[in-house]
């Protein structure tokens, strides 16, 4: 049986690879793509999500525009160093097949309300603002969520936003706190794991010659850090955990979120008073990349 999922996303090169895998692997029933601003702006992430669906000929899957501001803070300055101003380092996508809908939190809540308890997973690839709105404004649907799998945070690795904070959580610390503290089952995939999953050029060149395989090759080539090895494949790890958690070493930890105003706002705090959360702390990189390849056949 396919896993019924909502993908909350801010595409983004590695988001794009994750979405193409989810659509191409045959293991997911993608109910919709909900968008968040991330670091390239909501209009661009929404257009990119629609373009990825167009590549796959999936005009039946809605794109739903989310929020463009954090719960309580100002939006961070946009950073386009890694992903480029268009989010995809100049890789061109076709126009969306259908216009985007509005109000991602409300749409997610309606989908969940019409679903059986525990039957829909939320795969969160960007800042957690949309998901936090659902949990706080529609508590009656929380039991419909099977699991929220989140790319975010860091335990022992240096941060990529502040010294010890990761971009997604730092973009909206309050939203991360809401999600981690909720009654939903939450699994976090931090930088400790995602930085271990990188593609070499021979892996990229060997991806299948399918429409989405060719696009994945183009995206990963743009994502190469030094011409030989890609930057970390952060977001595809969410899909891989959802599909085969045995690839990862997952531990249950009590965590909280730093809600201060310093550069480490959004930092994950290991705290015995915190909420028990599953955290991926190790990965079999070879198995992860082998499974990822299967989504582009």
Image: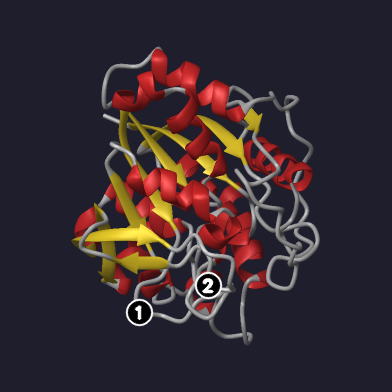
- At a point 40% along the width and 12% down the height, the residue shown is 114
- Residue 285 showing in the rendered view: yes
**Count of residue discs:** 2
Instruction: Please state which of residues 175 and 67 is positioned toward the viewer in this rendering.
Output: 175
- At a point 41% along the width and 38% down the height, the residue shown is 122
Question: Percent x, y for residue 140?
Answer: 36, 19
Position of 252 with respect to 234 (left or right) is left
Question: Percent x, y for residue 46?
Answer: 71, 40
Give the Cα separation between the discs numbered 1 and 2: 14 Å
Question: Percent x, y for residue 185?
Answer: 27, 41
Query: Which residue, given by chain and number where applicable, does mark 2 sit on?
Result: 264
- At a point 26% along the width and 72% down the height, the residue shown is 282
Callout 2: SS: loop
Position of 69 with respect to 176 (left or right) is right
Asked which colour scheme the image uses, the reply is secondary structure
Instruction: Please state which of residues 187 and 216 is positioned toward the viewer in this rendering.
Output: 187
- At a point 35% along the width and 16% down the height, the residue shown is 115
Query: Which residue, given by chain and number where applicable, does mark 1 sit on?
Result: 156
Q: Earlier in the sequence, mark 1 or mark 2?
A: 1
Callout 1: SS: loop
- Other residues around mark 1 within 10 Å, as few (<14) / some (14–19) / many (≥20): few
Quadrant where the N terminus is found in the figure: top left
């Amino acid at each position: 049986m396919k896993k019924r999922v909502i993908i909350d996303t801010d595409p983004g090169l590695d988001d794009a690879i994750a979405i193409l895998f989810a659509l191409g692997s045959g293991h997911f029933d993608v109910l919709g793509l909900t968008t968040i601003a991330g670091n390239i702006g909501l209009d661009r992430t929404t257009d990119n999500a629609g373009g990825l669906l167009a590549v796959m000929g999936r005009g039946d899957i809605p794109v739903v525009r989310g929020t463009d501001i954090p719960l309580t803070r100002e939006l961070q300055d946009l950073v386009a160093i890694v992903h480029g101003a268009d989010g995809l380092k100049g890789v061109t996508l076709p126009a969306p097949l259908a216009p985007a809908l509005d109000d991602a939190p409300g749409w997610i809540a309606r989908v969940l309300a019409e679903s059986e308890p525990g039957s829909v997973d939320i795969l969160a690839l960007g800042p957690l603002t949309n998901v936090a709105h659902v949990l706080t404004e529609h508590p009656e649907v929380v039991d419909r969520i099977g699991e929220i799998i989140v790319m975010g945070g860091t335990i022992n690795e240096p941060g990529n936003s502040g010294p010890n904070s990761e971009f997604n959580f730092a973009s909206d610390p309050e939203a991360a706190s809401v999600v981690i503290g909720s009654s939903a089952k939450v699994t976090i995939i931090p930088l400790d794991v995602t930085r271990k999953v990188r593609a070499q050029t021979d892996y990229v060149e060997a991806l299948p010659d399918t429409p989405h395989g060719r696009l994945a090759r183009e995206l990963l080539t743009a994502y190469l850090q030094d011409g030989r090895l890609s930057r970390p494949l952060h977001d595809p790890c969410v899909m891989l955990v959802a599909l085969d958690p045995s690839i990862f070493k997952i531990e249950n930890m009590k965590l909280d979120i730093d809600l201060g105003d310093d550069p480490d706002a959004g930092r994950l705090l290991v705290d015995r008073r915190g909420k028990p959360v599953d955290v991926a702390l190790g990965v079999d990189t070879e198995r992860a990349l082998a499974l990822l390849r299967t989504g582009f056949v």
